[in-house]
Amino acid sequence: MPANDNRSLDRILRTVRGHIRTHNLPRPDRLVISTLSRSVHAEFTAGTAVDRFAAVLLWTATLHGNEFGLTYGWRDDVRLAATGRTGTGIGIGLACSGSVFDLGGTVEEHDGLNGREHRFANLPGLPTLAEARTDLASFDELACLVASARSVAPVAAGVAA
């Protein structure tokens, strides 16, 4: 590896660490750094689904640029991906996932015209999402989802006890 790549890696790593400290952000569980594209991919896999979604939202609130976007998709879990840039121009991709039920949602099943069953996820504050489909969601919609899921979690824990 050329010395140039080492300096670039060090610079990106310092920038990401500084960004985490400056904004008091949760640390991702996985971090993939690309010196070629000057970008970072961070994944949140530990903790509750609500905590993972909240971590991605906290990070996105600190990012800049027109490349900002949130998407969600569903199959067995709801997947959230967000992108943006730090103030110094480092591209950041963020990802997490969680169960529809852990996020306070429900699943509906309907028979389709072709005899196949179709499943839909209903999540608080978001439009109904068809299985294996990805749609855009706004920061405010996802913040509402996290707040709603946090308010449902203590009730669900009490029922299970």
Image (spheres, grey):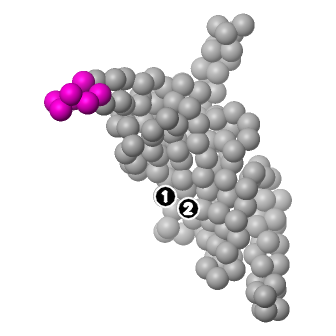
Give x and y (percent) for residue 35: 69, 80
Picture residue at 83% right of the left edge, 59% below the top:
21
Looking at the image, residue 41 lies above or below residue 104: below
Q: Looking at the picture, does residue 159 appear above or below residue 106?
A: above
Percent x, y of residue 19: 76, 64
Q: Label 1 amino acid?
A: Gly
- Left or right: 1 in relation to 137: right
| Numbered circle sitting on residue 83 | 2
**In-image side of 126 versus 29 (left or right):** left
Q: Where residue 50 appears, x then y in whole percent?
A: 64, 34
Q: Quadrant of the N terminus?
A: bottom right
The front one of 140 and 114 is 114
Mark 2 near mark 1, Cβ–Cβ under 8 Å? yes
Residue type at the position of mark 2: Thr
Q: Residue at x 36, y 31 (%)?
A: 120
Gap between marks 2 and 1 measured at Cα: 6 Å
Q: Position of residue 129 (x, y in %)?
A: 37, 37
Within-10-Å neighbours for mark 1: few <14, some 14–19, many 20+: some
On the image, which quarter does residue 51 sit in? top right
Q: Residue at x 45, y 44 (%)?
A: 73
Q: Secondary structure at mark 2?
A: strand
- CA neighbours of label 2 inside 10 A, class few (<14), some (14 to 19), many (20+): many
Residue that numbered label 1 is attached to: 69
Q: Give the mark, 2 or 1, whose residue is nearer the N terminus.
A: 1
Query: Which segment is the magenta one?
Result: 111-117
Seen at 26% across and 30% down, the residue is 116
